[in-house]
Amino acid sequence: MSSTSVNQIIDNFSSKAEFYDQYSRIQKLSGQMLLERIPALSYMRVLDLGCGTGFFIPELQELAQHVTCLDASEKMISFVKQRYPTVETVVGDFDNLDSCISTNYDLIVSNYSLQWSQNLTRLFASLKRCSTRKSMFAFAFPISGSLSELKKAFVEIGEPGFINEFYSEEQVKKALDEAKLTNYSVSVTTETVRLVYPGVLDVLHSISKVGAYTNTNEKYEHKLSKTILKNLINHTRAENNANVFNISWKICFIIGTRV
Ligand SMILES: C[S@@+](CC[C@H](N)C(=O)[O-])C[C@H]1O[C@@H](n2cnc3c(N)ncnc32)[C@H](O)[C@@H]1O
């Protein structure tokens, strides 16, 4: 991923921040699933990486005395500040945590954001420096196998590369190994969630409305033209039952506890 696309990722999230809460269906589901996996202990400080509009701040405030929200999008952070003036906020890049986080946390969470990381190994390794001796981290993000129906449809109309490649489960595990989290007990599990939409256009709409539409495939240079869209709609109508388009999200949950 080039630095241009990183700026593009953030600009695109910023431009749709006002719609995020309305359209973030899978993100909310995944966030609930992640919260269920966090032991209900009394934490001192929690750090949320890629917090977005801070949808889960009330739940995080129940878990911890002090909440810090980090996001690279100033616009997302401005929503957090408006809604939760007492929450600490950081405009920063989770791929460069060392440059923006100096405090130690006993809980570090992230929901539906780390798929945008350019360097998972570095991100995982930096956890060691910003966590307390007794700490845990809990992450949920989509991995390869997600959006497979949409990817298949784009391939079939001659537009491979339109849907971003997600990290595979093997790549995630390799990054964890390379990060050498020797003092942690780490579990990696996956769950596939299927959502039903009336049609392919509704799926694209839901992705676009949350700002998650940056194409990180440098080799793919097409724009989603009216012709491509028309081909896609006609193709999927012919292939699927009327008014039903299923979408799978394969979510990876990583829970790490310092031992
Ligand atoms: C899909 S949203 C998830 C928001 C929130 N965690 C939730 O569950 O609703 C992804 C967020 O990650 C942020 N993001 C993407 N790349 C980032 C990076 N390198 N550093 C920090 N934040 C990043 C985006 O700005 C966006 O707010």
Image: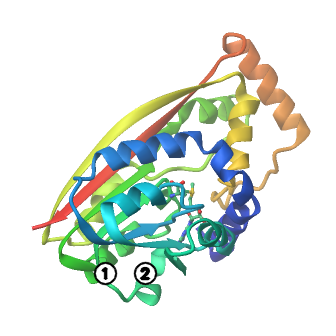
Hey, which residue is sitting farthest left in the picture? 259
Residue 16 or residue 57, whichever sits in front: 57
Q: Please state if 78 lies on the left or on the right of 133 as rendered.
A: right
Real-space Cα separation, disc 2 to disc 1, in angstroms: 8 Å
Residue on which the image places disc 2: 97
Amino acid at pointer 2: Leu
Amino acid at pointer 1: Cys
Relative height, residue 151 to residue 21 (above, below): above
Distance from mark 2 CB to nearest ligand 1 atom below 8 Å: no
Mark 1, secondary structure of its residue: helix
Residue 146 or residue 217, whichever sits in front: 146
Relative height, residue 135 to residue 187 (above, below): below
Which quadrant does ligand 1 occupy?
bottom right
Q: Residue 172: which quarter of the image?
A: bottom left
Mark 2–mark 1 CB contact (< 8 Å):
yes
Q: Please state if 149 lies on the left or on the right of 48 as rendered.
A: right
Q: Position of residue 112 (x, y in %)?
A: 49, 53
Mark 2, secondary structure of its residue: helix
Residue on which the image places disc 1: 130
**Residue at the spot x=47%, y=75% of the render?**
95
Q: Position of residue 51 (x, y in %)?
A: 51, 64
Relative height, residue 134 to residue 176 (above, below): below
